[in-house]
Structure formats: structure tokens, C-alpha cells
């Protein structure tokens, strides 16, 4: 054997990995719908005649945030009719009463209690269904339904912008990825990456295009045309989905509807993630659901994350020759692609080269999501085991 010959196959494998990582980032930056740009589209012109809109807000134990959410909805600068239906989803913390106090004497807020959760429904979607039924009685002529969460504070002109977009482009679904809270160290470390990874998976530009199958929405803020809901068979068509926003977008786009997804400028989430463990739990709650509970997809996703995010810095720091150069180039491309999202969130730019470690955290939470599912503890949210609800009922 020629000395050193045994190392040739390993060197070739390392070089191949470096080439693959660099090629992945070349593709992502140039051909993945510009997902990394982190900018919102220009506003649409205000329509002359504003249609009726009704908001549906499902709320389960949201005492901390519900007053701010309801207050922001009541302050909407919208000249058309706008009613608000709050669905109290068996709260135990006085959510409904706090909402009533926040509304004062306003006749626009209607609080309805959700009935017991039936089999086959996720908790949130059943509450939305209850709210839609109430909305039909209160405002049968509403052209749009604003589906929003109970921890979202809407900018005063948010509804007007959404309706203007929907009317100008004939859209069936207009959704905003609201600005998530980014205050604690855990939020600064992991929240911008959450939106970055979401946009990588569902490039917003592709979501908007009718010739692309890519469909996604952000459940915190979705303006849905009533006729589009009717066309897909109502919210019942996705009743068992845990990632309900993307399921709704897929159903509407699949039925021939036009959808839109964008970043919000000043509509924000109040949901707190004070510790890394809070972010971990948020990811683990639905990550394996995103992979359709498939062990094969889990392995593919893990290998993809390692090749895309971890291999570049490892090659750059430990490799030699061309492999190290390609690893450094891929790492640099990764950090550069992350910078716009960090700027959008006002986070320190030195987080950019640390994206591989952040991705490793997300991978760990994804693997834990699978572990929890296999142990029968997946999808837990506010006292409900969401992963089991499609098989039976719960409160």
C-alpha cells in the first residue's frame, strides 16, 4: 500500500461534503425565492368601499394578554363595519371577564363560550369553528374573517392594510407573520432564526405566486375571504390539523384561491419566551407534526440540517485545503443570508456567525419532538394533549 493511500477516500468524502454544503447555500441564496430578504411589500391602495369584517379570537387562559389584544382590535382605524367575536375556550383565569372590561361599553365585542371539544378536532380549530358560527349570526354579510390569536397587538391601520391588499389583488387569504417578541436573551438568540427557518421552508414570494404549490400562513394574523372558507368546506375541512395555519393556506390555494404572506411592520406578538427551555418547548410541540410523524423524514431533516448548517463551520475550522475554503465560503454565505432577519428584529449582528449553533438547538428540539410523540406526550398545550385529540375528545 502506498503511504497515505488509506486517507484518500476520507479526503474525497470531506471534499464532497464541502462541495455539497457550498452548493446548498448557493442554491438557497440565488434560487430559493429570496427568502432571506426580510422585507415587506409596498402597501396596496385603500378601497373606496370597505367591506364588512368580523374578527374571531380563540382564547384559552390568556388573561395576561387579552386586554391588549382586544384593545388593539377596538382601536382599528377602519371605516367599514367591524365586529369582534372572542371565543372563551374553557379558560380558568378570567380571560372572558378581562376582555369585557377592556371593551368597556363597546357593542362590537361579543364573547361566546366554546362548547365541549368533540372528537377529531384540535382545540384551537374547534374554538375558531365556534367563533365562525357566532360570526355568521352576528354579521352574515361580512366578506372577510380576521382570524387572530389572543396574544397579538394589531397596529391601528393593520385591518385596513389587510383588506386593501385582499381587495386590490382579489386574494382569498392575506396573512402576516407578526413581529415576535425579541426582548429576553433567549428570544434574541432563537426568535429571528425561527422566522428565518420558516421563510426558508416557505419562501414568501413563492407563497404569493399562483404557479407555485408552496402554501403557508401565519396563524397570528389571517384575513380570510368568507367565500374561500365555504369553497373548502369550512374550517371543518382541517379540523384535526395541529399546524392549522399552513393547512388552511394549503386548502385555499389548492382550491384555486390566491394567498399572500408577508412580514408585519408593527403588528406584534406578546407571547413571552424568557428562557431557552420555553423556545425549546415551542419547537418541540409541533416539529414532528411538521414532518408528518415520519421517522424517515426525521432522518432526512436531521441530515439536511447537519449538512446545511453544521458542516460549514466544522469544515472551515477543522478542514484543510479546498474543503476548508468551501466550508468557510458556505459559512460566510449563511451568515450573510441571516443578517437581514437580524436587522428586522433589531438583534445584534454578531449572532449571524452563530447560526450553526442555533440550528443545532432547533435540531435537538425537533428530535425531542419525535421522542415526546413516541412516548405519547406530544403536542401538549395548556392542559391538552393535542396529538391525541384526533382520536378522542378532551377539554
Image (cartoon, rainbow, N blue to C red):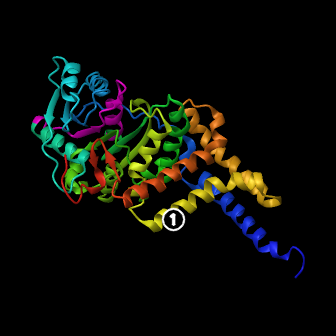
| Left or right: where 50 falls relative to 20 | left
In the structure shown, which secondary structural element does the residue marked by tag 1 occupy?
Answer: helix
Q: Residue furthest top?
A: 105
Residue at 76 percent of width and 70 percent of height: 10
Q: Quadrant of the N terminus?
A: bottom right
* Identity of the residue furthest to the front in this view: 375
Percent of width and height locating residue 177: 42, 39
**In the drawing, does residue 362 fall left or right of residue 125?**
right
Query: Is 153 part of what is drawn in magenta?
Result: yes
Question: Quick one: which residue is furthest to the right in this view?
Answer: 3
Q: Is residue 175 visible?
A: yes
> Which residues are drawn in magenta?
138-166
Q: Quadrant of residue 114?
A: top left
Q: Residue furthest left?
A: 137
* Image location (x, y in percent) of residue 36: 56, 45
Which residue is the site of mark 1? 299
Q: Residue at x 46, y 54 (%)?
A: 368
Residue 58, image x, y percentages: 24, 38
Q: Is residue 152 left or right of residue 342?
A: left
Q: Is residue 123 left or right of residue 209?
A: left
Note whether 82 is above or below 219 in the view shown.
above
Q: Which residue corresponds to the image point at 41% horizontal and 32% vertical from the top-left?
A: 272
Residue 167 placement (x, y as % from top left):
31, 39
Q: Residues within 10 Å of mark 1 (few under 14, many from 20)?
A: few
Which of the 4 image quarters holds residue 374? bottom left
- Residue 133 lies, with reference to residue 120, above or below; the image says above
Amino acid at each position: 500500500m502506498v503511504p497515505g493511500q488509506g486517507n484518500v477516500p476520507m479526503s474525497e468524502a470531506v471534499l464532497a461534503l464541502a462541495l455539497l454544503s457550498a452548493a446548498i447555500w448557493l442554491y438557497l441564496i440565488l434560487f430559493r425565492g429570496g427568502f432571506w430578504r426580510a422585507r415587506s411589500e409596498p402597501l396596496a391602495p385603500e378601497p373606496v368601499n370597505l367591506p364588512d369584517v368580523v374578527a374571531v379570537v380563540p382564547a384559552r387562559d390568556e388573561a395576561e394578554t387579552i386586554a391588549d389584544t382586544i384593545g388593539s382590535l377596538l382601536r382599528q382605524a377602519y371605516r367599514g363595519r367591524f365586529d369582534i367575536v372572542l371565543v372563551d375556550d374553557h379558560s380558568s383565569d378570567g380571560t372572558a371577564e378581562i376582555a369585557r372590561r377592556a371593551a368597556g361599553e363597546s357593542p362590537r365585542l361579543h364573547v361566546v363560550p366554546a362548547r365541549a371539544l368533540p372528537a377529531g378536532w384540535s382545540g384551537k380549530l374547534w374554538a375558531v369553528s365556534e367563533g365562525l358560527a357566532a360570526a355568521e349570526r352576528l354579521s352574515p354579510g361580512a366578506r372577510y374573517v380576521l382570524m387572530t390569536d389572543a396574544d397579538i397587538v394589531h397596529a391601528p391601520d393593520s385591518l385596513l392594510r389587510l383588506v386593501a391588499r385582499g381587495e386590490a389583488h382579489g386574494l382569498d387569504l392575506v396573512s402576516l407573520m407578526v413581529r415576535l417578541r425579541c426582548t429576553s436573551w433567549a428570544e434574541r438568540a432563537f426568535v429571528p432564526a425561527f422566522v428565518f427557518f420558516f421563510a426558508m421552508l416557505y419562501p414568501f414570494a413563492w407563497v404569493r405566486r399562483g404557479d407555485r404549490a408552496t402554501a403557508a400562513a401565519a396563524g397570528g394574523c389571517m384575513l380570510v375571504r368568507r367565500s374561500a372558507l365555504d369553497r373548502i368546506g369550512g374550517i371543518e375541512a382541517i379540523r384535526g390539523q395541529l399546524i392549522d395555519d399552513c393547512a388552511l393556506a394549503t386548502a385555499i390555494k389548492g382550491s384555486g384561491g390566491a394567498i399572500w404572506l408577508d412580514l408585519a411592520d408593527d403588528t406584534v406578538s406578546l407571547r413571552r419566551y424568557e428562557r431557552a427551555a420555553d423556545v425549546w418547548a415551542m419547537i418541540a410541540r409541533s416539529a414532528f407534526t411538521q414532518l408528518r410523524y415520519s421517522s424517515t423524514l426525521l432522518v432526512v431533516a436531521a441530515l439536511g440540517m447537519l449538512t446545511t448548517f453544521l458542516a460549514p463551520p466544522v469544515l472551515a475550522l477543522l478542514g484543510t485545503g479546498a474543503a476548508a475554503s468551501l466550508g468557510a465560503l458556505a459559512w460566510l454565505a449563511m451568515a450573510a443570508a441571516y443578517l437581514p432577519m437580524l436587522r428586522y428584529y433589531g438583534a445584534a449582528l454578531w449572532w449571524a456567525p452563530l447560526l450553526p449553533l442555533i440550528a443545532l438547538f432547533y435540531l435537538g428540539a425537533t428530535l425531542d419532538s419525535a421522542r415526546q410523540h413516541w412516548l405519547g406526550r406530544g403536542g401538549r398545550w395548556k392542559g391538552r394533549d393535542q396529538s391525541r385529540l384526533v382520536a378522542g375528545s378532551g377539554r
